[in-house]
């Protein structure tokens, strides 16, 4: 079982209304999600992000024209009224102590994803660590010259988690790889890989016991906040976060564990910012995150620093997101996992 560390990342996102329509996305879908940047050579662009949709569930992501799974998906559930899991809450609070939450993203770092057109050619991918828990290729990964991989500006050289995520327009399929490198002679090699149909419920797409590009067997992309959402004024899904230790078990929507013992939270555990937390003094962008943390919460997805949460690398993030670093982890509570 691997234990994936949370490393400093990078993100790019692109999509164009006309390109989305050509790829098979309806004008109604794009009206929900907003127009994005441009699709560039090799299938990805470095254009700016458009405004995202509002509401929860199957809100269309403006940059791709794709939903984020179904309205009733675990990532999209309103858990503001869920019961507190007192036993797990005690374990989490004992582990975090006086730590504060930490936005593990900003200008120049985040977890990157690439939006590729429906016509993006699929290429072979070799899986060299968890091939038996990987969805076989080919994957429509972008050309090496434009592909964005976590932790590097050149996919031929990378250390750390080196996530490579691609959302394919039209089909609305998500392809994720972990520990990915490109070789001019052999092409893409990743530690493992996972495919997700963004039009369907995420839980159940991964066999029980399988990992993914995330240690918990979850889709990485689903737990990232995107700049376009914040600019639209609402994040409509849960975020992913890490803790330094996790148990040797998992709960839905996770399918895999990467820890030891029992005196630690399981992968898939959900935490929620307490409704009573007063964020009125925080910057407007930070308050958007606060509202999402109260309504959708955060899902434990990986081993890493306590209460680090991830989002997109975008040059337009304001300094206001740093206000989130003032929130103590003790302002959160573990909740009973939704059925």
Image (cartoon, rainbow, N blue to C red):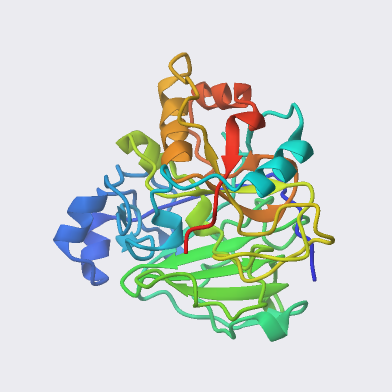
Q: Which part of the image, by quadrant, shows the N terminus?
A: bottom right
Residue 118 position (above or below residue 54): below
194 relative position to 260: left or right = left
Farthest top residue in view? 281
Residue located 23% across and 67% down the image = 25
Residue in view at x 56 percent, y 26 percent: 324
Using the image as rendered, state which of residue 47 and residue 296 is in the foreground.
Answer: 296
How many numbered markers are drawn?
0
Quadrant of res 184: bottom right
62 is higher (above) or lower (below) than 126? above
Identify which residue is drawn at 51% across, 67% down.
Answer: 142
Q: In this view, does 192 lie to the left or right of 78?
A: right
* Image position, residue 193 (x, y; %): 62, 74
Q: Nearer the viewer, residue 306 or 39?
A: 306
123 lies above or below 46: below
**Residue 10: image x %, image y %?**
60, 47
Side of 142 where 288 appears, left or right: left
- Foreground: 125 or 185? 125
Horizontal and vertical percent position of residue 300: 63, 52
Q: Residue furthest right?
A: 261
Residue located at (41% from left, 34% from top): 291
Asked which quadrant contains residue 65, the reply is bottom left
Q: In this view, does 237 lie above or below 251?
A: above
In this rendering, does residue 190 appear at all? no
Q: In which quarter of the image is residue 332?
A: top right
> Where in the figure is residue 45, as x and y percent of width and height?
42, 54
Whether residue 180 is visible to the viewer of this picture, yes or no, is: yes
């Amino acid at each position: 079982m691997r234990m994936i560390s949370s490393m400093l990342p990078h993100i790019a996102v692109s999509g164009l209304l006309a390109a989305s329509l050509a790829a098979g996305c309806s004008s109604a879908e794009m009206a929900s999600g907003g127009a994005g940047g441009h699709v560039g050579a090799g299938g990805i662009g470095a254009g700016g992000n458009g405004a995202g949709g509002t509401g929860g569930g199957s809100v269309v992501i403006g940059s791709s024209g794709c939903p984020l799974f179904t309205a009733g998906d675990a990532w999209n559930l309103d858990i503001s009224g869920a019961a507190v899991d007192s036993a797990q809450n005690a374990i989490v609070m004992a582990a975090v102590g006086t730590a504060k939450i930490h936005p593990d993203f900003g200008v120049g770092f985040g977890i990157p994803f690439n939006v590729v057109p429906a016509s993006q050619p699929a290429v072979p991918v070799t899986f060299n660590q968890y091939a038996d828990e990987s969805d076989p290729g080919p994957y429509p990964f972008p050309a090496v010259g434009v592909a964005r991989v976590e932790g590097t500006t050149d996919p031929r050289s990378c250390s750390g988690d080196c996530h490579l995520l691609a959302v394919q327009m039209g089909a609305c399929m998500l392809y994720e790889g972990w520990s990915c490198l490109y070789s001019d002679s052999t092409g893409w090699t990743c530690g493992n890989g996972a495919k997700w149909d963004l039009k369907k419920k995420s839980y159940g797409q991964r066999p029980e016991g399988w990992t993914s590009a995330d240690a918990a067997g979850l889709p990485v992309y689903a737990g990232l906040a995107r700049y376009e959402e914040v600019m639209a004024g609402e994040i409509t899904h849960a975020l992913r976060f890490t803790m330094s230790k996790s148990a040797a078990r998992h709960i839905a929507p996770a399918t895999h564990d990467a820890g030891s013992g029992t005196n630690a939270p399981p992968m898939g555990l959900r935490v929620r910012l307490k409704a009573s937390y007063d964020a009125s003094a925080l910057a407007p962008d930070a308050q958007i995150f606060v509202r999402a943390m109260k309504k959708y919460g955060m899902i434990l997805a990986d081993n890493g620093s306590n209460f680090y949460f991830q989002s997109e690398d975008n040059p337009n993030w304001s300094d206001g997101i740093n206000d989130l670093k003032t929130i103590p982890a003790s302002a959160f509570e573990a909740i009973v996992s939704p059925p």
